[in-house]
Image: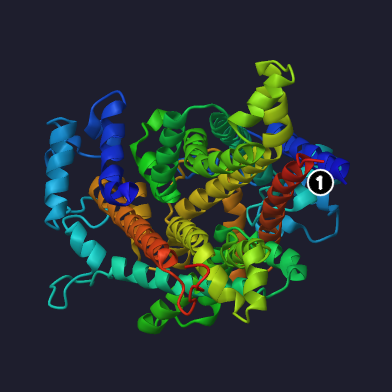
Amino acid sequence: MFAAIALPFIVPGIITALIWALPGDPASIICPPGQCPTEILKEEFNLDKGAWYFFLSWLGDALQGDFGTSWRVMTGVDVYELMMGSPADNQLVEPISAHLPNTILLLMLSLLPITIGAALGAMNKPTPKWDPILVSVGIIPIVVLSLLVAALVEINIDLDAENIAGRIKILAGALTLGIADAALSGSIIGVRGIFDRENKQRYVGVSILRGETVLSNTLPNVANSLVGQYRSRILHLLSGLVIVETIIGIDGIGRLLWKGTLKQDFGVVLATATAFAIISALLLLFQALLEAGIALHIRKAPKGVALTAEQK
Amino acid sequence: MKRVYLISAVSCLLILFFAAFKAPQHLTVGSVTSTYKYIQPLDMEKYDACLGVGKGQKSSQSSFGSGSNNNTDVRDSSYCNSVLLLGTNQKGTPLVEYATQGAKIVLIPSIVAGFVVAFLGVLGGLIRCFEAPILDSAVQLFAEVVGALPRMVVILVCALILPQDMRGLLPLAVLWAILASPTAMDEAGAVAGRLGGARFVEALRAHGFGSFRIYLYHIVALNLRPVVVRQGAEVMMQVVFLEVALSYLAVVESQPSFTHLDNLHSWADLLRMGYFSLIADKADTLHALVLGLALITLIVVTASSVSKAARAK
């Protein structure tokens, strides 16, 4: 719970601490004088007024939805607008994609393979004899799978039809994220392993003798482990987003973060990194709430079990 | 079987070390500098000699439009070996040089990252064996916070912040290792916990063993070794993939990578060449993709062999 609340503040805090911990002028560290107008950078982000001033002023603005303006990726454009997309009545020559919604859609879709994998694992399907194949598929690095998927999309999809191409790219990206780096195979094998261990417990045998289903008995006990595993897989997906979005060409915040890093756009990097931290914090919060709910559920007396007179 | 894994691990590491050692400072043919100008002309005489193109035969140089045909006597065996072993790209640059330069970029940082994770894993395991609840709680808090950070995001932020003269794969690899350490510490801690933690140490003390033997031999070498070596090998592999990914992303955006100097080329360049041959439906640089995938497989085999060779009997 502590990490969930602190994370959105920790990420910009770490960035601030790092900039001021390194020797030299903060503006020159972010972008060397030969490459950027450091005086403008200083003014833009209050870099000449000390670490605390910078951190608190940025945080105060960010809490009001003001993330400043991009000064290299799309000069002069609001970072908030870059993340959320340009409004319909915008006068810009080229409309800005809704980077954050695209990323959230991609993330949600990529949860499908993992969720299906978890369900299959709970049902002990496929059986362990398929594990070598699953592991072999899962071992493919995300950069390689993204590259192959990008080539497939490039060859087969008419990229001029921007709307359809965008949707297909998101679908392809979700599939890549859900399979590469052992996301799917890890989900199947991991969940199966948790249930295998639990099914060996004595109470499971007793529950079978009582005519109850195994899952209804084991699920509350393994739920915490399942939720923890699920969260770590989603975190892993968050890291993969940057690679998948950039290689397949999806306009998401991962790609925006990468562009910001390459072009040394400090405002964009700070805002997108915080957006990632908020997503991660929400996941932590969700996990904590779910764990609390499960703990409450387990503490309740099971229904339909009446105490005998002797037990009373 | 363990011996087979050990031989495989050592062989793979030797191949990587040899490749890194043989890596040239610059690509010999068609190489570019940071100003994007060719530094050497295409050496077609040598190349044709390697192909055995003699008098009266059509020379490969015809497609490039320079050089002479009397070249069977200029055969440079070391050059030919390098060219013919893995082929060249469209400019005539031997792909073996991409492979060796890529190995040079990733070798030391990935090994250092592996050792950092192994060290932190050992630390996590040993802390569980001490009677130190405050330290244990501090480690758990560290693991919770660091484990919740999306690794790639932190890497990119640090890549932006690091001063120009400090940029390279090594700091990013060490950072990646620190970000990956909570998993290793947690797993090593769980192993130590299963042993009995402080009670295990107490029991061995009762048998008359000294602290050095208990901690370094019984706990680290006998019990934590499989876990920390596996975690170290996995992180080593992840660092290589991280480098390939970051370099590939830089190539996609036509920017120099911050994981290596401009005169060096990552394995990502091989993948990029292969990608273009895939989408253009041309087979002329498809072998670059095959080579890139083979090198990635080599890393996977190395990591897997190292992990399996360190497994407990």
Q: What is the crowding at mark 1: few (fewer than 14 residues within 10 Å), some, or many (at least 20)?
A: many
**In the rendered image, which quarter is residue B221 located in?**
top right
Residue A258 seen: yes
Q: Residue furthest front?
A: A310
- Count of numbered circles in the view: 1
Local secondary structure at mark 1 = loop
Find residue A185 and report its horizontal and vertical position in percent: 62, 66
Find residue B79 and report its horizontal and vertical position in percent: 77, 40
Q: Nearer the viewer, residue B238 or A70?
A: B238
Q: Indicate left or right for B54 with A245 as reference.
A: right
Find residue B110 and report its horizontal and vertical position in percent: 60, 38
* Rendered position, B57 above or below A37: below
Q: At 52% across and 33% down in the image, what residue appears?
A: B170
Q: On the image, numbered disc 1 is attached to which residue? A: B71
Q: At 15% across and 30% down in the image, what residue appears?
A: A50
Q: Indicate left or right for A146 with B79 as reference.
A: left
Find residue A36 and report its horizontal and vertical position in percent: 24, 40
**In the rendered image, which quarter is residue B120 located in?**
top right
Identify the colour scheme used.
rainbow
Q: Amino acid at mark 1?
A: Asn
Tell me the subunit letter for badge 1. Answer: B
**In the rendered image, which quarter is residue B210 located in?**
top right
Residue A151 seen: no
Q: At 45% across and 59% down in the image, what residue appears?
A: A231
Q: Nearer the viewer, residue A30 or A235?
A: A235
* Rendered position, A245 above or below B213: below
